Amino acid sequence: MLTRWCTTLLLFLLALALTLPVLALLASWTQFDTAARQVLAEMARSVLSDYALTSLLLCVSVALGVAVVGMASASAVTLFDFPGRRVFEWALLLPLAMPAYVVAYAYTDFLQFSGPLQTALREGFGLRGRVFPEIRNTAGAVWVFTFSLYPYVYLLARTALTERASQLMEAARLLGAPLSRRVREVALPLARPAVAAGVALALMETLADYGVSSYFGIQTFTAGIYKAWLAMDMPLAAAQLATMLLALVALLLWLERRAQARMRFASLRGQRAGSVDAQPVRLRGGRAWIAVLSCGLPILFGFVLPVLFMLRPLLGGWDGLPWTSFVQWAGNSVRLAAISAVAATLLALALAFALRTRGDGFTRAVVQLASLGYAVPGAVIVVGLLLPVGWMQKAAPDSGVGYWITATVLGIVWAYLVRFTAVALQSVQSGYARVPSSLDDSARMLGSTGLALAWRVHWPLLRRSTMAAALLVFVDVMKELPATLVLRPFNSDTLAVVAYQLARDERLGEAALPALTLVLVGLVPVVMLSRTLRAR
């Protein structure tokens, strides 16, 4: 009985720690006095409409872009057979390795007024002035986000079409339906929930972004949060903006969960309806070229060109690269990522084991709360953590809370755990799903319970899932920018922070080295995902 109470208390404290940023934001509205009302009114008159309209325009444009690009490429590699199809199946995942802010730096360096392309055109054709329009605007951000985030739609749509559409497409062909009608009336309706879920995930990443919006000078909610906190020294205004952003993310999360539920329903219907083995339709001539372009252009714009654009200044200034500083930046990134990966994986194992052995409503609620953390933007987490620190410092100035949160790794690791424990938890739970519950019953009959059950029975079967969870968290922490930018300890710049700072100072040649290092690190989970899909 005592052990059960201790477990419940630990779960409660864990849930409190992981939800503290959101709770702090909600608690900030209890301080809504006359001053807070004046701040909100001033924001409504000056910047709030710009933040809302820009974020809305960005979301609508990115949603259309990722839906079209992701669905077109997924339909091509799933429903049709054409030259290079097997390569495109995994190559379309490569933009997942490119952080959006790295893509923004690459295109800016190559296409800006002083970049190599416009310089060569002016010298070659005797032109003057700007040859191309400025890329650092909302349209440029839409381009960057579309070709960086379309793999979310591609991955889910491809899975949906692979599992459900091919058999029904074959049945429709046997009934005499032409190809255009089969695609329009069979494949697209079945993939619609998957596309909606992928679009929701892409929009959550868009709203959470800070690197692209700040570098391009776009007035989004995330950029406004940092401006209100760091530039204007108005924590309450930052909290109010963070709450609005959190409400938008909650809406997108609800839409994504609803779409996932519709995907499961469609899966059951598709499995009952599909009983005929289907083969992709062979394309030739012009149709084959259209399929190749629909798959090749996203890879070109989302991965190949940005990498080539970053390699040019890197190779050109190889002798002047700051290798000593680079080793320090990489060491800071690896240290923070390793600490966070180990801590997040241990929390995920504890939560998954508690859910496996207890399974009561409270445990399920705690696990559900932990699994929502990845949807919370880094800017929201930063404000949610620093607000209670400020309150405690004001109430007890000698407590030293501010030091421990902002001057040590405690604050930044806490923020990483709030955001990335969900990533580890998903991987561990997928491993537990392959462990039959009959093994637990057999182990209990043989006297293994509690930690002995976890160590002797579960751990050998969860080893690969646990390693995958730690690796995914490690990579995500390496690429994380918004939370790291504010909460990192003094003299602990990471690769992501340095790449952002160098690009902001127009030192894009020096930013190429840390940016490409992040791309190489990001390729690891892409390779793992590609191998998993091919194995399936």
Image (cartoon, rainbow, N blue to C red):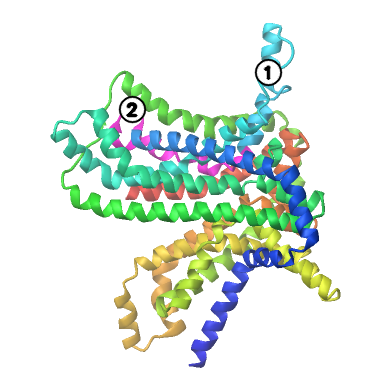
| Residue 73 lies in the magenta-colored region | no
**Disc assigned to residue 174:** none
Front disc: 1 or 2: 1
- Residue that extends furthest to the left in the rendered view of this protein: 175
Q: Write the start and end of the magenta stretch as one range.
A: 77-102
Height in image: 395 above or below 31? below
Single out the residue that lies furthest toward the right. Answer: 398
Q: Which residue is mark 2?
A: 83
- The answer to which of 424 and 474 lies nearer the viewer is 424
Q: Position of residue 415 (x, y in %)?
A: 65, 62
Residue kind at label 2, given as amino acid type: Pro
Write the residue at 49% across / 34% down: 65
Query: In x, y percent, where is residue 243?
Result: 64, 57
Please tell me whether mark 2 sits on a helix, a strand or a loop: loop
Counting from the top left corner in percent of width and height, residue 167 is at: 21, 43
Dot 2 surroundings within 10 Å: few (below 14), some, or many (20 or more)? some
Q: Is residue 435 left or right of residue 278?
A: right
User: Does 288 appear above or below 221?
Assistant: above
Residue 250, position in %: x, y? 54, 56
Q: Is residue 165 left or right of residue 318?
A: left
What label does residue 118 carry, if any?
A: 1
Amino acid on which the number 1 mark rests in the picture: Gln
